[in-house]
Image (spheres, rainbow, N blue to C red):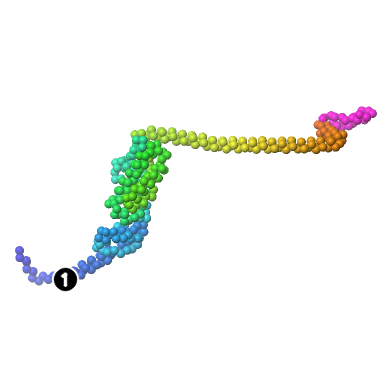
Amino acid sequence: MAALPPLPGAPKIRINSKLILGILIALVIVVGFFSSFYSVPANSVAVVQRFGAYLKTSEPGLHFKLPWGIDTITPVEVARQQKLEFGFATPGATNSYQYAETYEEMEQEKTMVTGDLNTALVEWVVQYTIEEPEKYLFTFRDPLQTLRDLSQASMREIVGDRSVDEVLTVGRQEMEIKAAERLRQLVKTLSIGIRIDQIQLGNVNPPRSVEMSFSDVNKAQQEKESSVNQAKAEYFKAVPRARGEAKQKISAAEGYATKRINEAEGDANRFQALLTEFKKAPEVTKKRIYLETMSEILPGVPNKVILDEKAPQFLPLMNLNSQAK
């Protein structure tokens, strides 16, 4: 088709190609300039790649990079402790790997077989921190999914080495420690770039079909432990008291024995002194002993009358008898 001739009187439109090219170049320069800077948050670092290859790790702050996709930035939170949940889900999680996507997957995660071939429902949390961003990004294609798989393998191994009673009652703390040690060993061997801070067990229950029976067993065991503790308390209360009373009686007996020994030794020394004096003057000593003995005895005898055998008559002494009464 032939081009239509311009209408008479229509204005002619002229396109300035140099101006358009200059505008495009200026726009590219402006876009490149503003895309050459990036900011790293305080709790993160930025892994810089140039043409897809690792270049460096930038600390928090404002940094420069090559624009137009030459340098790419991947921020990694290294100053925040993160967690993975197994067997349950906390609402509002920002990490898509924090818990399983479906209820069926959660049930599969927490259903485990113990060492005595029983079943237990174990919920737990893995708290971790990204320690080496380069290894975290480039060692595994999906490091958090790998960490979830390793966590399940470690916990199933620990649960499988214990009886159902240990898992449900007394073995919780030991299981947390052993599972964390096992997971740290695996993470270090595979160089994932993650530090395992701790593992915490949540709800640990028997299967729902036998939950009531296990509850009765646990209740009986708790009552047993309560009775044992009460008996120990009574024991530790009664035994020290009995020991104290025994020591008190022994001390009293020892004191009484010491007193009697001292009294006996005093009496013996006094008798020895009297014997010595008696040997020196027998008559005087006998008379002295007689008088001292009578002075001790007579005050205890009521209505007593003392007469001189040489007195001529009894009558003058009657007044003395009335005063003695």
Q: What secondary structure is the magenta-colored segment mainly? A: loop
**Most foreground residue, 45 or 8:** 45
Crowding near the residue tagged with mark 1, few <14, some 14–19, many ≥20 C-alpha atoms within 10 Å:
few
Query: Looking at the image, which residue is at 28% across and 59% down?
Result: 54
* Picture quarter with the C terminus: top right
Could you tell me residue 295's position as x and y percent?
83, 34
Which of the 4 image quadrants contains residue 34?
bottom left
Q: Is residue 269 left or right of residue 202?
A: right
Q: Which residue appears farthest toward the right when viewing the image?
A: 312
Q: State the residue in front, 294 or 186.
A: 186
Quarter of the image that includes the N terminus: bottom left
Judge from the rendering whether residue 216 lies leftward or rightward of residue 268; answer left or right. left
Left or right side of 319 for 239:
left
Residue occupying image coordinates x 29% and y 45%: 101
Q: Quadrant of residue 299?
A: top right
Residue 55: x and y in percent read 29, 60
Answer above or below: position of 53 versus 127.
below
Q: Position of residue 225 (x, y in %)?
A: 46, 36
Compare residues 272 and 257 and report the one nearer the observer: 272
Regarding mark 1 in the picture, which secondary structure is present there?
loop
Residue lying furthest left in this view? 1
**Could you tell me if residue 207 is visible in this image?**
no
In the image, the segment drawn in magenta is 301-325
Horizontal side, residue 99 vs residue 318: left or right = left
User: Residue 140 colored magenta?
Assistant: no
Q: Which residue is mark 1?
A: 16
Amino acid type, mark 1: Asn
